[in-house]
Amino acid sequence: MRITADSPHVQCSERLTAFGGLLALVKFLDLIGFEKLFAEHYLDPRREPKLGSYRMMLGILMLLFIGFQRLGQLAYIRTDAMVCGILRVPMLPAVSTFWRYLTSLTINQSTSLLKLGAALRGRVWELCGYAPRRVTVNIDTTVSTVYGAIEGSRKGHNMKHRGKKGLRPVLCFLAETREYLCGTQRKGETLKSEEVGRQIRQFRKLLPSSVREVRVHGDGECIGWESVKACLDNGFLFTFGKGRCEPPFAEKGWYRHGEHEYNECVYQPLGWEQPCRFVAMRIRKDKRGDRQLKLVENYVYRVFATNERARPQKVIEDYDQRADVENLIGEAQREGVLAIPSKRFQAHHAFFQVVMLAYNLWRWMKLLAGHAEQRALEGQEVDPRLRVTMPDHTIRIARLKMLYVAAKIRFHANRDQVCYSHHEQRAAGLIHFLDYMDARRREAA
């Protein structure tokens, strides 16, 4: 093959798509029964679009799944053969149609999307044979900086854009599968323990029945009697970073483990209905020259409220695993959490859940792809070039490996076919994953 500046260029009549991996999404949605669960759990808004709520929501989900964050970017895929074929239309509706549908969504649709996500989670875990008895939920917040008159925006804690208005969503992630459990779009105010308590009380009904024990980890913004009471009422183990309370630790109680010292006490902060266990780590600061006096206290303290019974160093070691939630929030931000599609707060509230549902679809597909690889390797020896290896990568890399695979759509034997090139290195792994999902679909039937 030889391509030069003198190579001729022409047009062809065949239908081509840059998003050949969307076929895997279609098979995955059929495998988990997405349309049926959507009809059971989703609450239709007052606006009745011609395509129906399912295809309108599927169009927005595909936009986010592809990697676009703004509804206006639907114009770039409006005539894509794969997208139009999935939605069964010759051309996608105008962007304003999707915009009007989004602005018609309210908090009711946001709540129904959470219930839909819980039903899908149970189905995916069942397909993967994943039934953990214990999970860890990490709670954290982020800031969406806004410009203009956006309903609900406030000036608050915004490290990157000080003094700017923003929204402050809260997100809860499962540490084991790295998927989104629940959360909500919030006004740009500091998170209160009452709001954390409301999130914690949702965990039981959003988790599959196999889960018996839940551990909750949160930073100092989450601590408060309401959040602690919610954990106690539901029988959850919790570890929260210290807020404004100052528990007294006995000087004789400090003991050394490794390089640092640890202590614990039982203390009842002001406004709490009962005392709670507090554990602490103190870290000696580096000495600054020979003039440092030995009698001057030179420590940095880390204090946590918890109801776990393990030794303080073990409690703090487990809590430090929560640092990975920052990576998950950064990934969610790149998926569209920071996008502000409308001036209406209720539209943001619903769009936030749509974004996180698209985020979870990637997580669940990666989980299923990992199960497919494990199942293949257990039975026989598989060529490494045929493996998808999606679980090892972030969503951005997974798109490059599985979604952005060019394909040709042709009509043959009285049906449409999706054809991948023999010369495409990623096609072999994608076809292996498609064959696996076809086999699972036949088993379900």
Image (tube, grey):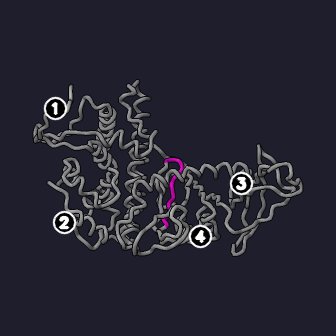
- Distance from Cα at disc 1 to Cα at disc 3: 75 Å
Residue type at numbered disc 2: Lys
**Mark 2 or mark 3: which is in front?**
2
Question: In the current view of this chain or complex, which residue is farthest to the right?
Answer: 295
x, y (%) of residue 334? 42, 54
Q: Which mark is residue 193?
A: 4
Query: Outermost residue toward the front?
Result: 5
Above or below, 346 against 120 in this view is below
First in sequence: mark 1 vs mark 2 = 1
Nearer to us of marks 1 and 3 is 1
| Span highlighted in magenta in the image | 168-177
Q: Label 1 crowding class (10 Å Cα cut-off): few <14, some 14-19, many 20+?
A: few
- Look at 26% across and 57% down and name the residue there: 74
Disc 1 residue type (three-letter)? Asp
Mark 4 or mark 3: which is in front? Answer: 4
Instruction: Tell me residue 404's x, y (percent).
Output: 30, 42
Query: In terms of secondary structure, where does tag 2 sit?
Result: loop
In which image quadrant can residue 13 be found?
Answer: top left
Going by the numbered disc 3, the residue's amino acid type is Arg
User: Between residues 98 and 218, which one lies in front from this camera angle?
Assistant: 98
Residue type at numbered disc 4:
Ser
- Dots 2 and 3: beta carbons under 8 Å? no
Q: Is residue 45 magenta?
A: no
Residue located beneath label 2 in the image: 50
Q: Which residue is mark 1?
A: 6
Is the Cβ of the residue at disc 1 closer than 8 Å to that at disc 2?
A: no
N-terminal of the two: label 1 or label 3?
1
- Dot 1: element: loop
Along the horizontal axis of the image, is 130 left or right of 386? Answer: right
Q: CA distance from mark 1 to mark 4?
A: 68 Å
The residue indicated by pointer 3 is 309
Asked which secondary structure carries label 4, the reply is helix
